[in-house]
Amino acid sequence: MTWLITGGAGYIGAHVARSMADAGERVVVLDDLSTGVPERLPKEIELVEGSLLDRGLVDRTLAAHAVTGVVHLAGKKQVGESVEQPLRYYRENLHGLTVLLEAVVAGGVGRFLFSSSAAVYGVPDVELITEQTPAAPISPYGETKLAGEWLVRATGQAHSLATACLRYFNVAGAASPELSDTGVFNIIPMYFDRITRGEAPLIFGADYPTPDGTCVRDYIHVADLADAHLSVARRLAGQRQPGDLTLNIGRGRGVSVRELADLVADVTGHGLTPEVGPRRAGDAARAVASVDLIAQELGWTAKRSMRDMVGSAWEGWRLRHPAAPVG
């Protein structure tokens, strides 16, 4: 097997590329470097720079490397930005996926793993979100992920592909400091950014129907997420018949925003009391994955703790922000 990983120079993509390569899989990366960092990839992994919207480039890459499977991680992923720029998100996420799948079918590639998101569920009022929980996304980003799943499954059925759609919950941490998230869009780097500037972490709403009044979320270490991709890719590689596997990727355990703020304080030693602001539109009180299906199908469970996530993320943050306080 040779795997093409789209978006493989990104935060998640580089972890997946390294995990698969370290396990002996042949890997090539296609990334437009809009957010990717080439230095995240070891020298033995070839990086092809370019856009999925360039059908000719995609065709040439698949043929030149005799690609037999694709892990599709490339795309735009900021919920708020998607509300402001829906046309861009549909073009990049859905049209880009269409171009890629057309090339996959034309090139005879038989396996396709799609990076989806828990955003497809919207704000369900359930204790645990299973793969059968109705999908009702509330942002253009979530819509593109759900429509992407539909397109992947339909293409698999029509053209005899083995497919998988992985619905990530909240990804955090780093396998090593140089692979850490460079963005300030998710809650942990948002906290780090504020404390580095001497500002208290900000909690959006403390009046939710949860034990401490703050939102409860499921967090997954990015290294565990990468290991899950490897397990799913190997399942697809071993399939002799087409079919789809749709799986949640999380820990199956909820952590409140206030608990997370306390953990960040402990790891970083900042000593700032969190500030409580108004709720954000669209935030669910609770969003925690049921992870029974991936355990049943693959025997996979997450291994790393919340402290592992926060601690490794903090090491990466301090690598890029030497002025950050020492915990």
Image (cartoon, rainbow, N blue to C red):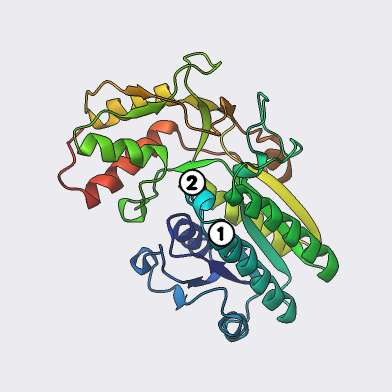
Disc 1 target residue: 89
Helix, strand or loop status at disc 2: helix
Q: In this view, does 51 lie to the left or right of 163?
A: left
Which residue lies most toward the top here? 211
Helix, strand or loop status at disc 1: helix
| Residue 312 shows in the view | no
Packing grade of label 2 (10 A; few <14, some 14-19, many >=20) is few
Query: Are the two marked residues, 1 and 2, in contact with CB atoms closer than 8 angstroms?
Result: no
Q: Distance between the residues labelled 1 and 2?
A: 11 Å
Q: Is residue 71 left or right of residue 175?
A: right
Query: Which residue is found at the position 54% from the left and 67% from the top?
Result: 6
Whether residue 294 is situated above or below residue 46 in the rendered picture: above
- Amino acid tagged 2: Gly
The quarter in which the N terminus is drawn is bottom right
Whether residue 173 is situated above or below residue 288 in the rendered picture: below
Query: Which residue is found at the position 21% from the left and 28% from the top?
Result: 270
The percent coordinates of residue 203 (x first, y second) are 39, 26
- Amino acid tagged 1: Tyr
Query: Any mark on residue 80, and which?
Result: 2
Q: Give the mark nearest the N terminus, 1 or 2.
A: 2
The percent coordinates of residue 116 (x first, y second) are 62, 51
